[in-house]
Amino acid sequence: MLEELTDCPPINLVLAKQAARFEVRASEEKTGTWKGAWERIKSLVQSARGRKRRRALTDPMSQATDALDGKSSKTRCEEAWQALKATESQGNRRLGGAVKWKTQKSIWASMTKAQSSLFTQMRTGHIGLRAYLFSRRVPGTLTPWCNCGMGRETVAHLLLDCTASDRPPDLRSRRDLDEAIIDPDRCRDLVAWVMDSGRLSEYALARNLGANRTAANNDDSDESH
C-alpha cells in the first residue's frame, strides 16, 4: 500500500535495478581487476579441494542478465513499475491518483487512527467490501456484487452508483470523487459516510465510539450554555 500512496516502486523492483546495475558494471570490468580477482579465488578453491575431477566453478559474470536489452537499469525499472501499476489498477483504479507526501500527511493528521486506516483502504481499494474480498477468495464471500445488483461492491460504487443507500449529494462522477478524496476538508466527510454505511463491520466499534464522543461533546456544550 505504501508504494501506491507515495507512487514509489516496490522494493523488489528497486533491488532488481541495483542488481542489474552491479552485474552490468562487473561484466564491463571483467577483463580488468575483477577477472584477476576471480581467477585467484578460483585457483585457491580448486587447490584446496585437491582433486581434479571436481565440478568446475562457473564464472558468475557469465550469467549476467541480458534483460536490459540495451536500456539502462533505471529505464527498465521505471517501465516495470508502470506496467505493474497498470496491471493492478485494472477495474480497481486508485482513488485520487498519486498525491504529494505533504498533502497525504496533512490529511492523516486531521483524522483519528480508525479514520486514517479507512481512508488508506478507500484509496487503495484494499478494503473489506465484496469486490475485494471475492478477488482474494475470502471464505464466505460468494459474489463480488453489491446488494443493489447494479455493480461490484467497491468504494466508487457505494459513493456514486449504489441504489441501496443514499449517496453523498455533491458527488456526480468519478472525477468528483477523485478530487474529493484528496481534499483535506472533504475527505473526512467521505470517510465518515463509508464508516457509517454499516458495510464494514470491522469499524462498528470505531463508529460507536465516535457517536458516543459526539454525544458527550454535545452534552458539555449544553451545560456550558
Image: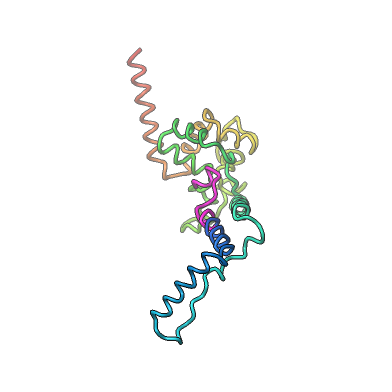
**Residue 103 in sight from this viewpoint:** yes
Which colour assignment does the render follow?
A: rainbow
Residue toward you, 145 or 138: 138
Residue toward you, 216 or 182: 182
Q: Quadrant of residue 179?
A: top right
Residue toward you, 26 or 90: 26
Q: Position of residue 190 (x, y in %)?
A: 52, 34
Q: Which residues are magenta?
A: 1-16
Q: Position of residue 104 (x, y in %)?
A: 50, 36
- Asked if the magenta segment contains residue 67, the reply would be no
Q: Quadrant of residue 117?
A: top left
Residue toward you, 93 or 4: 4
- The image shows residue 97, relative to residue 137, as above or below, that is above
So how many labels did they put on this image?
0
Q: Position of residue 133 (x, y in %)?
A: 50, 53
Q: Residue at x 64, y 36 (%)?
A: 175
- Asked if the magenta segment contains residue 5, the reply would be yes
Q: Main secondary structure of the magenta part?
A: helix
Q: Residue at x 52, y 30 (%)?
A: 184
Q: Position of residue 194 (x, y in %)?
A: 50, 38
- The image shows residue 81, relative to residue 34, as above or below, that is above
**Residue 90 in sight from this viewpoint:** no
Which quadrant of the figure contains the C terminus? top left
Outermost residue toward the top? Answer: 225
